[in-house]
C-alpha cells in the first residue's frame, strides 16, 4: 500500500513538473514535405508518437497471437492423427503380445502411416508378418522402417538379421551381421548373433577369432565363453583330420592333428576335457604311443586326476613301461583313487591279475565309484570268483543303481527249511 502511494506521488510530481514546462514553453514543431506542412507543439508531437507506438505494438501482438483458419485446421489434423496413431499402436502391440499376428500387422502398419515416430510400428509389424511366414510383407515393412528413419539403420539391420537367422537364411544373415560389425564393432548383441550364425554354419575358424573379442567386451559370462571355446577347439581338432583327402597317410594325419593342437589359443593342456578329446583322436588314428607320451608330459607338468584316469585307457605298445611310469607316480600320489584305478588297468594289460584286484579294491575303498566297481567285478568274474563278484555288487548296489527314488519295499521272506 505504501509503495502504491509513493508511486502515485512520483507520478503526480512528474505530471506537475511536465505541466509547468508545457505552460512555460509549449515548443514549436514544423514538418514540411513537398507542398504539405504540419505545425504543432512539441508536447503534442511527443504524445502522438507515444500513442502511435502503443497502438502499433498492440496490433502486431494481436496478429501474432491470432492463427489463421488454415493453421488451426492443420494443427487439428495433426492432433487427430497422433491420437488415432497412438490408439492403433496400443491395439497393435496388444495383438502382438497375444499372438494375433495378422491383426497386429494391420494395426501397426496403419498406425505407422499417421505416427511421427513410425520406426517402432514398422519393426513390430515386420515381426508380426514374420510370424505368419510372410517373407514379402516382412521385407517390405523393414524397408519402410529403413526409409522412415535412415539414422536408425543399426536398429533395422539387427531386426533384419534376427529374422534372417530365424528363417535359416544363414549366408544373408552373415552378410548383414558383418556389415553391422563394421558399423558397431563393440555391439555385444551383434557378437552374440554372429556367434549363433558361426555355430550353425560350423565355421569354427571364424568363431575362434570371435571368442577373444567377445571375452574382451564381456559379451557372454566367462563360464559360457569357456564352454564355447572348448567346443570350438574340439571341433578344430576334428576338422584338422576331416578336411584331409582320403588318401592322406596316417603319419600326415598325426602331423596335421599335432599342428592343430599347438595352434589352439591359450593353454589347451590345462583343459582336461580338451586333452581327452585330443587323446581320443590320437587313439582313433592308431597313435597310442603319442597319446601316452602326451598325457605323460601333461601329468608330469600338472597333476590332474582326470588325466591320470585317461592314462590308464591308452594302450601304448610298451605296456610294462607304461605301468612302471604309473608306479613312479604312486610315490607322491599314493592316495589317489584315479591313479590306483589306472594302476589296476595297466596291471591287467601286463596280466598281473592279483595285483590288479588289490589296486581296484584300494581305489574303491578311497572313493566308491561305479567305474571302479565295474572293473573289479568284471575281473573277479573272469577269475572264476563269481560269488565274490556278486557280493561286491550287492554291497555297492547304490553305485550300480544310483538315482533311484525312495520307495517302500516288502519285508524279506524267510527261506523255508525242509522238514
Image (spheres, helix red, strand yellow):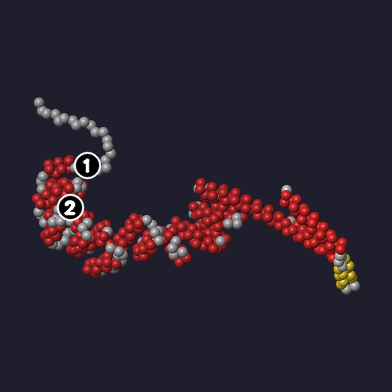
Point out the image quarter for the C terminus: top left
**Vertical position of residue 241 compared to residue 417: above or below:** below
| Residue 53 appearing in the image | yes
Res 398 label? 1
Give how far across and how far down residue 127 sits, in percent: 50, 54
Q: Which residue is nearer to you in this view: 285 or 400?
A: 400
Residue visible at 38% across and 57% down in the picture:
220
The residue singled out by tag 2 in the image is 336
Residue visible at 25% across and 61% down in the picture:
269
Tell whether 307 sits left or right of 266.
Answer: left
Tally the numbered discs.
Answer: 2
Q: Quadrant of residue 303?
A: bottom left
Label 1 or label 2, whichever lies nearer to me, is: 2
Residue visible at 58% across and 57% down in the picture:
117
Q: Quadrant of residue 399?
A: top left
| Residue 160 appearing in the image | no
Give how far across and how far down residue 43 sits, in percent: 84, 63
Res 410 label? none
Q: Residue furthest right?
A: 35
Amino acid at each position: 500500500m505504501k509503495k502504491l502511494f509513493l508511486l502515485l506521488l512520483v507520478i503526480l510530481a512528474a505530471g506537475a513538473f511536465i505541466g509547468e514546462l508545457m505552460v512555460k514553453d509549449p515548443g514549436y514543431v514544423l514538418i514540411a514535405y513537398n507542398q504539405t506542412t504540419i505545425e504543432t507543439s512539441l508536447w503534442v508531437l511527443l504524445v502522438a508518437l507515444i500513442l502511435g507506438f502503443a497502438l502499433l505494438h498492440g496490433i502486431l501482438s494481436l496478429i501474432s497471437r491470432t492463427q489463421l483458419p488454415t493453421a488451426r485446421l492443420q494443427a487439428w489434423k495433426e492432433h487427430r492423427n497422433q491420437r488415432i496413431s497412438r490408439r492403433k499402436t496400443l491395439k497393435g502391440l496388444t495383438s502382438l503380445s497375444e499372438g494375433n499376428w495378422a491383426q497386429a500387422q494391420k494395426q501397426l502398419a496403419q498406425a505407422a502411416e499417421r505416427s511421427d515416430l513410425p520406426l517402432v510400428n514398422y519393426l513390430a509389424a515386420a515381426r508380426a508378418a514374420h510370424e505368419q511366414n510372410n517373407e514379402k510383407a516382412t521385407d517390405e515393412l523393414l524397408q519402410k522402417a529403413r526409409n522412415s528413419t535412415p539414422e536408425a539403420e543399426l536398429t533395422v539391420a539387427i531386426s533384419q538379421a534376427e529374422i534372417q537367422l530365424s528363417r535359416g537364411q544363414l549366408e544373408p544373415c552373415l552378410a548383414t551381421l558383418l556389415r553391422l560389425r563394421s558399423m558397431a564393432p563393440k555391439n555385444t548383441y551383434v557378437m552374440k548373433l554372429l556367434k549363433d550364425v558361426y555355430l550353425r554354419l560350423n565355421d569354427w575358424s571364424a568363431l575362434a577369432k570371435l571368442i577373444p573379442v567377445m571375452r574382451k567386451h564381456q559379451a557372454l559370462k566367462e563360464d559360457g565363453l569357456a564352454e564355447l571355446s572348448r567346443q570350438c577347439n574340439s571341433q578344430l581338432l576334428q576338422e584338422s583330420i576331416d578336411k584331409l583327402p582320403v588318401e592322406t597317410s596316417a603319419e600326415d594325419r598325426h602331423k596335421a592333428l599335432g599342428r592343430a593342437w599347438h595352434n589352439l589359443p591359450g593353454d589347451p593342456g590345462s583343459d582336461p576335457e580338451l586333452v581327452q578329446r585330443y587323446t581320443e583322436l590320437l587313439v582313433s588314428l592308431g597313435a597310442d604311443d603319442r597319446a601316452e607320451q602326451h598325457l605323460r608330459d601333461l601329468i608330469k607338468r600338472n597333476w590332474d586326476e582326470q588325466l591320470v584316469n585317461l592314462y590308464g585307457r591308452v594302450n601304448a605298445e610298451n605296456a610294462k613301461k607304461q605301468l612302471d611310469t604309473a608306479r613312479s607316480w604312486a610315490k607322491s600320489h599314493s592316495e589317489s583313487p584315479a591313479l590306483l584305478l589306472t594302476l589296476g588297468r595297466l596291471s591287467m594289460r601286463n596280466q598281473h591279475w592279483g595285483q590288479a584286484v588289490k589296486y581296484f579294491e584300494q581305489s574303491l575303498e578311497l572313493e566308491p565309484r561305479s567305474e571302479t566297481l565295474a572293473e573289479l567285478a568284471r575281473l573277479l568274474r573272469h577269475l572264476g570268483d563269481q560269488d565274490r563278484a556278486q557280493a561286491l555288487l550287492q554291497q555297492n548296489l547304490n553305485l550300480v543303481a544310483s538315482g533311484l527314488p525312495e520307495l517302500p519295499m516288502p519285508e524279506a521272506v524267510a527261506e523255508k527249511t525242509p522238514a
